């Protein structure tokens, strides 16, 4: 019985329900931009223009994998159901250079299991 309780406590600690806000981006494009650094540069965070990367990786009609970039620079990918919800949101609202969103769901590692996604005001 104590093993079962320990397992339940551990599994609940691994996934956290909550809400997040940030800018929706094409996950593959943004990951590529983040990897695009000079190998001899030791201060990569200083040389980056996050706003430019966000605009460059703004989701398009063919985007199928999404991520949210928070104001502090944290990046969270959406799960496959969240990707589908983001595609539907894009269809409803149209293309933008910055796409601020509010998301509710559960965090598992660095992936959000999306319950809902909407345009942030």
Image: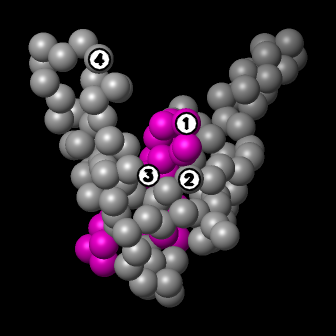
Residue that mark 2 sits on: 22
Point out the tag, 3 or 1, that comes first from the N-terminus: 3
Q: Position of residue 37 (x, y in %)?
A: 18, 29
Point out the tag, 2 or 3, that comes first from the N-terminus: 2
**Mark 1 secondary-structure assignment:** loop
Q: Please report the bounds of the magenta region as a residue range.
A: 60-86
Answer left or right for 33 relative to 95. Answer: left
**Mark 3 secondary-structure assignment:** strand
Q: Which mark is residue 43?
A: 4
Residue at 22% x, 43% y is 32
Residue at 46% x, 59% y is 24
Dot in front, 3 or 1: 1
Answer left or right for 113 relative to 97. Answer: right
Q: CA distance from mark 4 to mark 3?
A: 24 Å
**Mark 4 secondary-structure assignment:** loop
Q: Position of residue 55 (x, y in %)?
A: 33, 59
Q: Which mark is residue 72?
A: 1
Q: Residues within 10 Å of mark 1 (few under 14, many from 20)?
A: few
Answer left or right for 36 relative to 91. Answer: left
Residue that mark 3 sits on: 67
Q: Residues within 10 Å of mark 4 (few under 14, many from 20)?
A: few
Q: Which sits in the foreground, 111 or 27?
A: 27
Q: Are marks 2 and 1 in contact (CB under 8 Å)?
A: no
Dot in front, 2 or 3: 2
Quadrant placement of the C terminus: bottom right
Point out the tag, 4 or 2, that comes first from the N-terminus: 2
Point out the tag, 4 or 3, that comes first from the N-terminus: 4
Residue 61 is a magenta residue: yes
């Amino acid at each position: 019985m104590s093993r079962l309780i320990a397992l339940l406590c551990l599994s609940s600690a691994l996934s956290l329900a909550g809400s997040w806000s940030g800018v929706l981006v094409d996950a593959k494009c943004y990951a590529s931009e983040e990897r695009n650094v000079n190998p001899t540069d030791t201060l990569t965070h200083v040389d980056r223009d996050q706003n430019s990367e966000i605009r460059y990786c703004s989701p398009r009609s063919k985007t199928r994998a999404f991520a949210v970039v928070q104001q502090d620079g944290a990046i969270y990918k959406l799960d496959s159901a969240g990707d589908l919800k983001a595609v539907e949101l894009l269809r409803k609202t149209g293309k933008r250079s910055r796409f601020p969103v509010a998301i509710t769901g559960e965090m598992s590692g660095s992936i959000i299991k999306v319950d809902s996604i909407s345009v942030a005001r």
